[in-house]
Image (spheres, grey):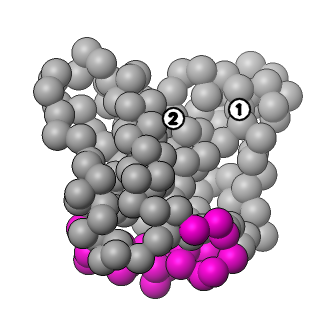
Amino acid sequence: MSRMRITEDRVARTLEGQSFDFKCTGCGNCCKGPGDVYFTESELKALKEYLNLSAWSFSRLKKKLIQDTIPGYYVHRSGDACLFLEDNRCAVYPVRPLQCRTFPFWPSNFNSKSNFRHLKKDCPGSMSGLGAALDAARVTARVQKTEAAFLQPQKDADDPIML
């Protein structure tokens, strides 16, 4: 499969010569919808174990949690917020999916100035001065690591999706 990877040049153009910083403020905005959350079979099993669910309870959770599948992933389509968001906190934080663990270092957040403006507007921890300043090279490395990890479960997909 050939994919155009996000490049340092694209990230540098998006950042417009600025460094990027991020420190989570716990606002919960990244978990509020509408939106899709993608998780693998192993992440689903980790949720079951973390929540210490019986087979019956796990079956009920899966019915609420999974609205779709794509190669390598189950899809939770949230309307207002993620199913696991409680009082602006993740109820399954230690076992949250890759998508959640890697925010805001998603290719979509850095592939255009428009998307980056939305990130800054929606996420008070982005460009807040609270986190360590990262240059375009370090941001690109983090985004490419996210991209590679997210694509790996889709290795046999004809048309893989990306965050």
**Residue 21 placed where, x, y %?**
56, 70
Residue at the (55%, 39%) spot, across then down: 98
Residue 143 vs residue 63, the one in the foreground:
143
- Among all residues in the image, which is located at the extreme right? 52
Residue drawn at x 40%, y 22% as measured from the top left? 153
Q: On residue 47, which mark appears?
A: 1
Q: Would residue 109 be found to the left or right of residue 131 on screen?
A: left
Residue where numbered disc 2 is placed? 39
Q: Vertically, is 67 above or below 32?
A: above
Q: CA distance from mark 2 to mark 1?
A: 10 Å
Let me know if residue 116 is in the magenta part: yes
Mark sitting on residue 74: none
Three-letter amino acid code at disc 1? Leu
Q: Position of residue 128 (x, y in %)?
A: 60, 82
Amino acid type assigned to the residue bearing label 2 in the image: Phe
Where residue 7 sits in the image (x, y, percent)? 25, 49
Q: Earlier in the sequence, mark 2 or mark 1?
A: 2
Give the extent of the magenta segment: 112-133
Q: Nearer the viewer, residue 108 or 143?
A: 143
> Element type at marker 2?
strand
Q: Taking 160 as reference, is 87 left or right?
A: right
Residue 32 appearing in the image: no
Asked if residue 55 shows in the view, the reply is yes
| Residue 30 image-quadrant placement | bottom right
Depth check: 146 or 136 in front?
136
Left or right: residue 2 compared with residue 153: left
Q: Are marks 2 and 1 in contact (CB under 8 Å)?
A: yes
Tell me if residue 58 is in the magenta stretch: no
Judge the density around disc 2: few (<14), some (14-19), many (≥20) Cα neighbours within 10 Å.
many
